[in-house]
Image (spheres, rainbow, N blue to C red):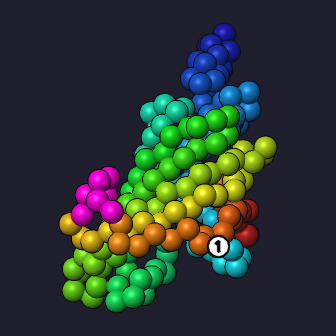
């Protein structure tokens, strides 16, 4: 009897986790998790971690590895931090902000990157669309000031969920 009651305790504790891991297709896919994506040329371009306290909005971290000389005169760019909001069954809008800096760690500008993620039917893939990058001076108000540059030339591109995939250890 002890073994059976222990099984029910473990099952009861695991039940709330199962829909989050498997995805609830009735309400659309959940974006929470870690992702990677390719640019329009098929090169790995970004990684992102999406988190949230609800199914409708949350935070995200977007990293663009190898961003040395991403902008003229910049050495690198900070990890972009942002927010996401669910806009439909499997559709999410997002905005993130990062700071390119030079070799002396001086901030050169503010970059605001926004777009839409449309999760695929499998809930493990997405299409990133409607990307807009706005560039502001280092001390600008990104919500009321006019950007010094706007780039809408980003092509739609795929992203994929990072899943647990531990390989077998060789003997």
Residue lying farthest to the front in this orientation: 146
Q: Position of residue 116 (x, y in %)?
A: 59, 52
Please tell me whether residue 1 belongs to the stretch shown in magenta.
no
Q: Residues within 10 Å of mark 1 (few under 14, many from 20)?
A: some
Q: Which residue occupies 27% across, 88% down?
A: 103
Residue name at image x 63 percent, y 24 percent: 15
Query: Which residue position holds label 1?
Result: 39
Based on the picture, tell me whether residue 141 belongs to the magenta stretch. yes
As helix, strand or loop, the secondary structure at mark 1 comes to loop
Residue drawn where x is 75% and y is 48% of the image: 120
Residues rendered magenta in the picture? 140-146
In the picture, measured across the screen, residue 99 lies left or right of residue 163, that is left
- Which is more toward the observer, 67 or 91? 91
Against 62, residue 120 (above or below) is: above
Can you say whether 51 is above or below 95 in the image? above
**In the image, farthest residue toward the top:** 1
Q: How many marks?
A: 1
Q: Is residue 130 above or below residue 29?
A: below
- Looking at the image, residue 79 sits to the left or right of residue 65; the answer is left
Where's the N terminus, which quadrant? Answer: top right
**Image position, residue 39 (x, y; %):** 64, 73
Quadrant of the drawing holding the C terminus: bottom right
Q: Is residue 24 visible?
A: no
Looking at the image, residue 142 sits to the left or right of residue 66; the answer is: left
Q: Horizontal and vertical percent for residue 143? A: 32, 52
Instruction: Pinpoint residue 130: horizontal percent, then vertical percent.
Output: 60, 58
At x 30%, y 73%, the residue is 109
Q: Nearer the viewer, residue 83 or 66?
A: 83
The picture quadrant where one finds residue 92 is top right
Say if residue 74 shows up in the picture.
Answer: yes
Between residues 22 and 91, which one lies in front from this camera angle?
91
């Amino acid at each position: 009897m002890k073994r059976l009651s222990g099984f029910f305790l473990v099952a009861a504790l695991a039940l709330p986790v199962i829909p989050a891991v498997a995805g609830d297709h009735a309400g659309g896919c959940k974006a929470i998790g870690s992702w990677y994506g390719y640019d329009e040329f098929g090169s790995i371009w970004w990684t992102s971690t999406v988190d949230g306290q609800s199914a409708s909005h949350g935070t995200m971290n977007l990293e663009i590895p190898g961003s040395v000389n991403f902008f003229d005169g910049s050495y690198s760019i900070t990890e972009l931090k942002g927010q996401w909001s669910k806009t439909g069954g499997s559709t999410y809008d997002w905005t993130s902000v990062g700071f390119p800096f030079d070799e002396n760690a001086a901030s050169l500008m503010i970059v605001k990157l926004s777009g839409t993620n449309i999760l695929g039917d499998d809930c493990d893939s997405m299409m990133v669309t409607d990307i807009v990058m706005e560039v502001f001076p280092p001390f600008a108000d990104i919500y009321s000031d006019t950007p010094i540059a706007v780039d809408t030339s980003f092509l739609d591109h795929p992203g994929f969920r990072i899943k647990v995939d531990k390989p077998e250890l060789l003997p």
